[in-house]
Image: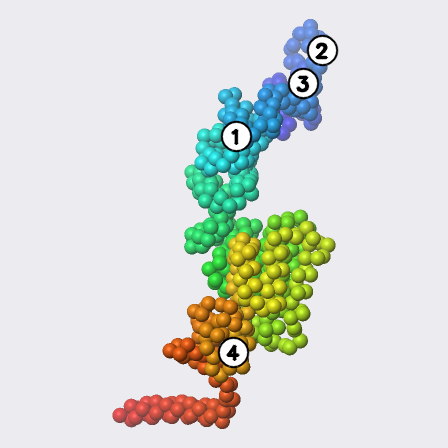
C-alpha cells in the first residue's frame, strides 16, 4: 500500500491535477513532498528549501545480532555446562544430585542453549536412576516435580521427543523390569490426559500394549489395543496403525488365535503399503509372517521370511534382534527335514506328502548354517542349543532331546515360538519311536515299551491312548494286564462302503417323497 502524503498537504483551492507525483518506492525526506501555499512568504519557502535531508540509519545485521546473542547465552549457561560435564567422571549415585540441580536451577533459564543442556540432563538422570536401581525415582521422573518446569517451558514437540527418548532408554537399560516400564507408561498416559496430549498418549499406549504382551498379560493388552485402534482409524495415522496392528497380531498369536493373527498382520501390511516403512519395522513384519507360516507347517515359506528379516537386521548390525531370526531359520530346517524323514502325518505337514529320499544324513546340514562368513558373529549358546536339538533329532533320541532342553533352558524355553515348536518336535519323535518299537508285536507289555524308550510308564501309556484315538495305529490298551494289543491294518471293503452310501441316498429320497405326499394330503383336505 502506497501512502499519498501530498493529498493531505494540498491547498484547499489547489486543483487535484497539479499535485506532486506519488513516490512508489521508499519515502524520501518529508520536505520534498511539502508544497508551499500560494500566499506563503518567500523567506519561509527559502528556509524550508535549506533544510538538509536526514541520513538514513542502516538496520542491524541479523547474523551479527544472533551470533552475539548466542555467545552471550553461552556465557550465561556456562555454569550449567560445567556441571553437566563434571558428571561424566562421577558414579551414577553421585551424579544424581548434580543433574537434579541443573533441572531445578533458580534462574529458570530456558533459552536454546539452556534447554538443550537440560534435555541432556534428563537423559543422563534417567540413565543414572536405572544404573543405581532407584525404580521409584525412575517412575516419577517425567511426571514429578523434577521435569515439570522444563515441560511447562518447552514446546509440545520437544516434550514428546524427551518422553519417548526417556522411555526407550529405560526399556533398553532395564529390559527385564517390565513392571517398572508399565508403571512409567501409566504415569505418562495419566499426565498426557491431564495436559491433553492426545498424539503422545496414543504412542505411549502402543508401547504399553507391547510391554503388557511381554508380561503375558494378553487380555489387558488386547483391550488397550482395541481401544487404541478405534482412535487411530479415525485419525488415519498410518505409521502408528502399522505398529499397532503388528502388536495385535503378536497378541492373538500368543492366545493361539491364528486366524485373527493373520487378519491383524494383513491389516498391518495394508497400512504399510501406503507409507515408507523403516527397515527395522519391515523386518518385524517379515518375522511375524514367518511365524504364522511356521504355525501352518509351511516351513519353506517361513524360512524365506525369516531369511529376509535376518538380512535386513544384519545390515543394520542389530545382532540382538537378528539372532532370533537365525534360530527360527534353523528350527524350520529341523522341522521340515525331520518331518520328511519320519514320514509324519499329512495333517502335521500341512498336506505335504512325505518321500523316502530323506535320510538321517540330511539333518546335520542344519548346523552348517552357522559356518558362513555372515553368521560367524552370532556364535554362542543360542546357536549351540539349536545345533544340539538338530543332533538329537538326527539320532531320534528323546533322552538326548530332553537333556538338551534342560541344559539350554533359557535359550529354548524363554522364546514362545521355539518353545511351542519344540513341543511339536518332541511329540513327533515320541510317536515315531513308539511306532518303531511296537511294529513287530501283536501284544506287548506297556512297561517293556517304556523301558525301551526310556520314559515314565504314565507318559507312554497316555501317548499310546492318544495315538489309538487319532488312528495312528489300530489297537487297544488292556490296563488290567498292562498290555498293548495291536491289530493288523485291515483293508477296507469298498463294496460295503458303496452299499452304505446307496442306502443313505435311498433314505433321503424316501424322506423327501414322504414330505411331498403329506403336503398334497393337506391341500386336498
Residue at screen point 63% across, 22% down: 74
Q: Name the residue beneath numbered marker 1.
A: 93
> Position of 305 compared to 513: left or right?
right
Q: Secondary structure at mark 1?
A: helix
Q: Calculate the distance from the C-alpha at mark 2 to the C-alpha at mark 1.
A: 72 Å
Mark with earlier residue (1, 4) = 1
Which mark is nearer the camera, 2 or 1?
1
Which mark is nearer the camera, 3 or 2?
2
Image quadrant containing the C terminus: bottom left
Q: Calculate the distance from the C-alpha at mark 2 to the C-alpha at mark 4.
A: 123 Å
For the residue pair 208 and 14, the one nearer the viewer reads as 208
Q: Secondary structure at mark 3?
A: loop
Q: Are marks 1 and 4 in contact (CB under 8 Å)?
A: no
**Alpha-carbon neighbours of circle 1 within 10 Å: few (<14), some, or many (≥20)?**
some
Q: Name the residue beneath numbered marker 3.
A: 33
> Position of 417 compared to 482: left or right?
right
For the residue pair 166 and 205, the one nearer the viewer reads as 166
Q: Calculate the distance from the C-alpha at mark 1 to the C-alpha at mark 4.
A: 67 Å
The mark found on residue 438 in the picture is: 4
Residue at screen point 54% across, 53% down: 410
Residue at screen point 66% across, 17% down: 30
Mark with earlier residue (2, 1) = 2
> Position of 270 compared to 514: left or right?
right
Amino acid at each position: 500500500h502506497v501512502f499519498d502524503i501530498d493529498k493531505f498537504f494540498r491547498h484547499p483551492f489547489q486543483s487535484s491535477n497539479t499535485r506532486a507525483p506519488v513516490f512508489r518506492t521508499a519515502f524520501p525526506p518529508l520536505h520534498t513532498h511539502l508544497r508551499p501555499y500560494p500566499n506563503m512568504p518567500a523567506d519561509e519557502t527559502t528556509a524550508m528549501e535549506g533544510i538538509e535531508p536526514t541520513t538514513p540509519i542502516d538496520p542491524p545485521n541479523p547474523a551479527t545480532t544472533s551470533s552475539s546473542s548466542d555467545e552471550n547465552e553461552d556465557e550465561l549457561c556456562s555454569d550449567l555446562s560445567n556441571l553437566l560435564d563434571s558428571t561424566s567422571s562421577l558414579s551414577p549415585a553421585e551424579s544424581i544430585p548434580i543433574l537434579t540441580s541443573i533441572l531445578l536451577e533458580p534462574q529458570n533459564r530456558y533459552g536454546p542453549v539452556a534447554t538443550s543442556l537440560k534435555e541432556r540432563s534428563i537423559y543422563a538422570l534417567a540413565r543414572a536412576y536405572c544404573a543405581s536401581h532407584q525404580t521409584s525415582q525412575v517412575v516419577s521422573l517425567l511426571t514429578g516435580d523434577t521435569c515439570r518446569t522444563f515441560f511447562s517451558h518447552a514446546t509440545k514437540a520437544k516434550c514428546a521427543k524427551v518422553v519417548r527418548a526417556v522411555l526407550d532408554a529405560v526399556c533398553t537399560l532395564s529390559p527385564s523390569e517390565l513392571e517398572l516400564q508399565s508403571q512409567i507408561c501409566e504415569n505418562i498416559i495419566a499426565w498426557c490426559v491431564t495436559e491433553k496430549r492426545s498424539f503422545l498418549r496414543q504412542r505411549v499406549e502402543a508401547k504399553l500394549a507391547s510391554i503388557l504382551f511381554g508380561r503375558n498379560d494378553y487380555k489387558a493388552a488386547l483391550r488397550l489395543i482395541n481401544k487404541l485402534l478405534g482412535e487411530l482409524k479415525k485419525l488415519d495415522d498410518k505409521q502408528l496403525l502399522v505398529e499397532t496392528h503388528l502388536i495385535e497380531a503378536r497378541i492373538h498369536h500368543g492366545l493361539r488365535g491364528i486366524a485373527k493373527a493373520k487378519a491383524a498382520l494383513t491389516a498391518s501390511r495394508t497400512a504399510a503399503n501406503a507409507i515408507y516403512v523403516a527397515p527395522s519395522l519391515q523386518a518385524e513384519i517379515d518375522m511375524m509372517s514367518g511365524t504364522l507360516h511356521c504355525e501352518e507347517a509351511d516351513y519353506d515359506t517361513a524360512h524365506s521370511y525369516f531369511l529376509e528379516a535376518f538380512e535386513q537386521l544384519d545390515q543394520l548390525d542389530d545382532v540382538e534382534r537378528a539372532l532370533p531370526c537365525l534360530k527360527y531359520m534353523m528350527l524350520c530346517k529341523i522341522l521340515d527335514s525331520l518331518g520328511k524323514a519320519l514320514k509324519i502325518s499329512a495333517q502335521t505337514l500341512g498336506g505335504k506328502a512325505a518321500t523316502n529320499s530323506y535320510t538321517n544324513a540330511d539333518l546335520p546340514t542344519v548346523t552348517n548354517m552357522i559356518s558362513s562368513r555372515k553368521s560367524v558373529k552370532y556364535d554362542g549358546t543360542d546357536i549351540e542349543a539349536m545345533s544340539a536339538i538338530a543332533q538329537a533329532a538326527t539320532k531320534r533320541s528323546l533322552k538326548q532331546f530332553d537333556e538338551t532342553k534342560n541344559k539350554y533352558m533359557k535359550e529354548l524355553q524363554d522364546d514362545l515360538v521355539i518353545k511351542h515348536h519344540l513341543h511339536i518336535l518332541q511329540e513327533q519323535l515320541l510317536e515315531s519311536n513308539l511306532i518303531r518299537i511296537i511294529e513287530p508285536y501283536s501284544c506287548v507289555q506297556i512297561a517293556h515299551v517304556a523301558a525301551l524308550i526310556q520314559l515314565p510308564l504314565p507318559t507312554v501309556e497316555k501317548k499310546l491312548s492318544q495315538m489309538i484315538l487319532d488312528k495312528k495305529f489300530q489297537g487297544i490298551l488292556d490296563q488290567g494286564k498292562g498290555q498293548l494289543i495291536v491289530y493288523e491294518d485291515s483293508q477296507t471293503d469298498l463294496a460295503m462302503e458303496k452299499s452304505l452310501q446307496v442306502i443313505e441316498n435311498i433314505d433321503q429320497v424316501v424322506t423327501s417323497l414322504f414330505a411331498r405326499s403329506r403336503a398334497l394330503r393337506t391341500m386336498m383336505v
